[in-house]
Image (cartoon, rainbow, N blue to C red):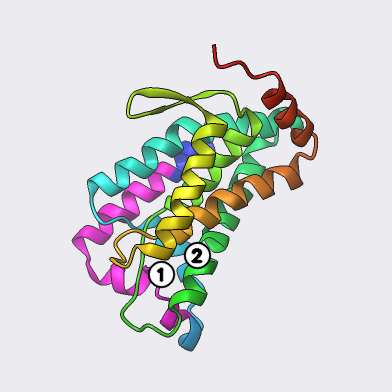
């Protein structure tokens, strides 16, 4: 069984359990105020396994399902078949890094909380884009080169993080998770830098 499938299964089971046991949302969601004052650092990890509903859950896990195995395969090619270890480290560290901005931004707001694997999944997605920047990604059923999608996505999330005051979507987590996906991949596979820029140099739209 692949690591991606294991993560998906665990996330589905935990989310479904939380829907039947609402107290889990208070106990395990990411609450910067509680992390700061009660040192509940476990929330950096547990919040990624909680989702508000099936739509939220499926959207995140659908992305992970398609890009997780690809990233694991790339890491395996670079590290002698141990790609699952690198994917696991990427996913776990992305949980923390993606929530770092949220922590500092809302650590004094007692009512703020967030849930979802979006930050960690964004890291996996952007790792895949870095490994193969010209591969097509379907956006509203329209194929777009990965590097183009990545640029638009980062610009949008950076803007939304500053201008969206609804608090319904954690754009900070999306942004920091995406950036961490690239940074981690460069650290783990330095040779990917040359391949990335060679791919861009040789890219032809048609």
Front-most of 15 and 67? Answer: 67
In the rendered view, tell whether residue 175 sits above or below residue 129: below
Q: Quadrant of residue 74?
A: top right
How packed mark 1 is, by other alpha carbons closer than 10 Å (few <14, some 14-19, many 20 or more), is: many
Residue 179 numbered tag:
none
Whether residue 116 sits left or right of residue 204 in the image: it is left
- Compared with 76, 37 (above or below) is below
Q: Is residue 79 visible?
A: no
Main SS of the magenta segment? helix
> Are dots 2 and 1 in contact, CB under 8 Å?
yes
Residue 83 seen in the figure = yes
Q: Secondary structure at mark 2?
A: helix
CA neighbours of label 2 inside 10 A, class few (<14), some (14 to 19), many (20+): many
**Residue 170 x %, y %:** 39, 60
The quarter of the picture where the C terminus appears is: top right
Q: Residue at x 52, y 59 (%)?
A: 98
Residue 172 among magenta residues = no
The percent coordinates of residue 42 (x first, y second) are 49, 71
Query: Residue 139: x percent and y percent?
Result: 38, 30
| Residue 99 tag number | 2
Distance from disc 2 to disc 1, alpha carbons, whole Å, reads 8 Å
Residue 28 in magenta? Answer: yes
Q: Which residue is mark 1?
A: 30
Residue at (61% x, 52% y) in the render: 180
Viewer-side residue, 182 vs 24: 182
Residue numbers of the magenta segment = 8-35
Residue 184 in the image: x percent, y percent?
68, 49
Residue nearest the viewer, comparing 47 with 111: 111
Q: Secondary structure at mark 1?
A: loop
Identified at 53% across, 33% down, the residue is 148
161 on left or right of 51: right
């Amino acid at each position: 069984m692949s690591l991606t499938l294991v993560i998906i299964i665990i996330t589905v089971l935990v989310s479904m359990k939380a829907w039947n046991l609402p107290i889990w949302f208070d106990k395990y969601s990411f609450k910067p105020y509680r992390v700061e004052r009660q040192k509940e650092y476990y929330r950096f990890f547990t919040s990624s396994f909680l989702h508000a509903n099936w739509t939220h859950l499926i959207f995140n896990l659908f992305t992970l399902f398609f890009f997780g195995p690809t990233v694991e395969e790339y890491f395996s090619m670079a590290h002698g078949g141990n790609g699952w270890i690198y994917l696991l480290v990427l996913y776990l560290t992305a949980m923390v890094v993606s929530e770092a901005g949220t922590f500092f931004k809302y650590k004094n707001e007692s009512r703020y909380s967030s849930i979802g694997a979006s930050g960690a999944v964004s890291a996996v997605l952007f790792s895949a884009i870095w490994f193969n920047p010209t591969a097509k990604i379907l956006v509203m059923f329209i194929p777009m080169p990965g590097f183009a999608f990545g640029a638009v996505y980062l610009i949008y999330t950076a803007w939304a993080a500053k201008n969206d005051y609804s608090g319904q979507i954690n754009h900070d987590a999306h942004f920091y998770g995406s950036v961490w996906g690239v940074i981690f991949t460069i650290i783990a596979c330095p040779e990917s830098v040359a391949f990335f820029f060679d791919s861009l140099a040789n890219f032809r739209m048609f």
